[in-house]
Image (cartoon, coloured by chain):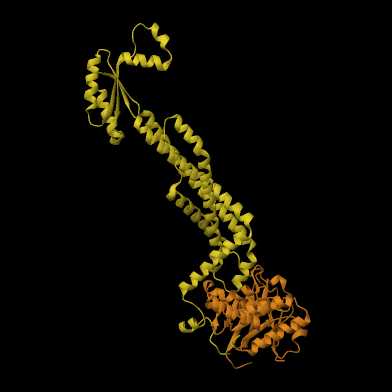
């Protein structure tokens, strides 16, 4: 060891150059070096007690997986209902006084309108035959002497028009003199969309609550961690450690908890989607649909990990700043 | 008293704890730069309180504590870490970090100052060599004897080249042979120029040593005698 000179100035007030000479890098490099060390140290600490760390990460993972899973479910329902928009159609029931020829002519006129993609004329006889075939009430119909079914024009609007314009167009069709009554089949779709809006809001609220839960989980884990290292913190303070120096390892621990939780949540979702993929394909097949479950996607996955990290860090920060100041040397 | 500028100067210091207990009553003394002295007195005489005032663990109720020409009342809570980094503190219970190696323990003060790893290694090895523990640098403190653990504590205290070493009953848990060894170590550090103040109640140990004794009795200064 070098012999310190008796009248050497105190270390607190040497010149900048002298400080450099004594091996003190500039602030940025110093912080970088300390952060890098704490970053890895905190990971090693979690690795040193794998079961406890894994349990905490698992709880965070499950808590994150729930809202993320609901979000994926919503996204898929959205995709399905977008496909259903193609089946948006209106049935125009014609007055019985309209002859089949007039009906067909009307159908042609309607099909030339803007915003109409397809039309189909169903005469009274065709309607009866169809009903006989599909309903199974064929024999009952024989009792009724007269055909009770009206002729119908089925109109399929161009969905690109948007709900407002479609609505207006169908209303104008319903007002035609030949039309007895018009039935808009999109009412149920509107109800579905309204329901999805409610669900979306519900998922948002659940996600908020579970995010709060993650904050508490991380906060509590860090609180216990701080309690276990109370003596160490006391000693570090005596040696002149700043609040930042003491806080940093705990913040990084929060970061790692959050990241591990996010990764676990992601894995849980992937496994759940794999498990659901087969049955969903079967179900879609029964509906003649080529629908496939979509997962989180790249953006969604990154968002999930990001949420985990931010919540882990924040949960730790909220706890650490309150707890550390209470630990002072006596 | 020495004519050299004082490293420690207490002026009429009073410390009354929140419970009303009067720990120090108008205590004045100074320690010259480069001096080594013992702070003695029975337990409860105020030795620990005095060291706590110097280390800014406690603040005086009245009076001035001036360390290295700096009045401690001018140091805010935010300035305490920086101030403590300039001191070398040694404790009766060693206060080591038991989940870290001897090297990491001794390196902590330099780590706190943000020194470069290569410089840290060089200085820590030198400090461990001074206390004779270089061969244990990668061991955990629990594998060492009490005397060796205290020497780790001393290495940690001197590694930052403090202007003042403060030791609170450093030999309190050690047998006489080890205690004498530790005292010789302090004497050697003092010869190197470091100012040293050691609180102890072990009068047998220090009676033969040629250093001033500052005696506290129930919070008052007794005679400060040069032996």
Compared with A32, A3 (above or below) is: below
Number of numbered tags placed on the structure image: 0
Q: Quadrant of the N terminus of chain A?
A: bottom right
Q: Using the image, determine if residue B27 lies above or below residue A172.
A: below
Q: Is residue B46 visible?
A: no
Q: Splitting the image into 4 quarters, where does residue A96 fall?
A: top left
Residue sitting nearer the eye, B182 or A13: B182
Q: Nearer the viewer, residue A34 or B78?
A: A34
Residue B188, horizontal then vertical, whole percent: 67, 88
Residue B69 rendering spot, x and y as whole percentages: 54, 85
Q: Which chain is orange?
A: B
In the rendered image, the quadrant that contains the C terminus of chain A is bottom right
Please tell me in which quadrant of the rendered image residue B186 appears. Answer: bottom right
Q: Locate residue B52, reporting x and y percent.
A: 63, 76
Name which residue lies at 39% across and 14% down. Answer: A132
In the foreground, B64 or A266:
A266
**Residue A97 against residue A29 in the figure, above or below:** above
Evaluate whether residue A124 shows in this view.
Answer: yes
The x, y position of residue B63, in whole percent, is: 59, 80
Q: Judging from the image, what is the letter of the chain drawn in yellow?
A: A
Which residue is at the far bottom? B3
Viewer-proximal residue among A81 and A201: A81
């Amino acid at each position: 060891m070098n012999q310190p000179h008796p009248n050497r100035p105190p270390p607190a007030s040497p010149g900048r150059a002298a400080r450099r000479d004594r091996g003190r890098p500039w602030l940025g490099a110093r912080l970088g070096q300390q952060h890098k060390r704490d970053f890895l140290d905190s990971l090693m600490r979690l690795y040193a007690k794998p079961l406890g760390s894994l349990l905490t990460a698992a709880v965070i993972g499950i808590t994150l997986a729930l809202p993320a899973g609901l979000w994926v479910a919503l996204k898929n329902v959205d995709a399905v209902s977008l496909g259903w928009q193609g089946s948006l159609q209106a049935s125009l029931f014609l007055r019985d006084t309209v002859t089949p020829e007039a009906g067909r002519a009307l159908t042609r006129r309607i099909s030339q309108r803007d915003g109409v993609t397809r039309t189909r004329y169903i005469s009274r006889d065709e309607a009866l035959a169809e009903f006989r075939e599909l309903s199974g009430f064929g024999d009952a119909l024989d009792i009724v002497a007269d055909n009770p079914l009206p002729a119908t024009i089925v109109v399929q609007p161009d969905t690109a028009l948007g709900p407002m314009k479609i609505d207006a167009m169908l209303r104008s069709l319903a007002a035609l003199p030949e039309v007895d009554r018009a039935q808009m089949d999109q009412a149920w779709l509107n109800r579905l969309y309204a329901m999805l809006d409610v669900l979306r809001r519900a998922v948002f609220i659940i996600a908020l609550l579970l995010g709060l839960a993650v904050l508490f989980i991380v906060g509590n884990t860090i609180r216990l961690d701080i309690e276990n290292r109370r003596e160490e913190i006391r000693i570090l303070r005596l040696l002149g450690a700043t609040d930042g120096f003491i806080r940093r390892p705990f913040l990084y621990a929060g970061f790692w908890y959050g990241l591990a939780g996010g990764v676990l949540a992601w894995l849980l979702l992937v496994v759940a989607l794999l498990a659901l993929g087969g049955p969903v394909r079967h179900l879609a097949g029964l509906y003649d649909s080529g629908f496939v479950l979509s997962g989180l996607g790249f953006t969604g996955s990154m968002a999930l990990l990001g949420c985990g990290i931010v919540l882990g860090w924040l949960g730790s920060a909220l706890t650490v700043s309150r707890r550390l100041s209470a630990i002072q040397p006596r | 008293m020495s004519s050299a500028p004082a490293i420690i100067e207490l002026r009429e210091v009073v410390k009354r704890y929140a419970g009303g207990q009067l720990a120090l009553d108008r205590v004045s003394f100074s320690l010259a730069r480069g001096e080594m002295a013992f702070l003695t007195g029975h337990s409860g005489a105020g030795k620990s309180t005095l060291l706590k005032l110097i280390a800014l663990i406690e603040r005086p109720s009245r009076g001035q504590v001036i360390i290295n020409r700096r009045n401690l009342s001018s140091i805010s809570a935010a300035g305490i870490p920086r101030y403590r980094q300039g001191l070398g503190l040694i404790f009766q219970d060693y206060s080591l970090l038991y989940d870290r190696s001897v090297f990491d323990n001794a390196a902590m003060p330099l780590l706190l100052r943000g020194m470069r790893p290569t410089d840290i290694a060089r200085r820590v090895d030198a400090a461990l060599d001074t206390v004779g523990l270089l061969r244990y640098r990668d061991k955990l403190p629990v594998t060492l004897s009490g005397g060796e653990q205290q020497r780790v504590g001393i290495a940690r205290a001197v590694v930052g080249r403090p202007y003042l070493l403060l030791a609170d009953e450093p030999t309190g848990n050690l047998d006489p042979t080890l205690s004498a060894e530790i005292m010789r170590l302090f004497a050697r550090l003092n010869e190197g120029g470091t100012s040293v103040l050691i609180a102890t109640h072990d009068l047998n140990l220090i009676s033969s040593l040629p250093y001033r004794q500052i005696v506290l009795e129930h919070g008052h200064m007794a005679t400060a005698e040069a032996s």
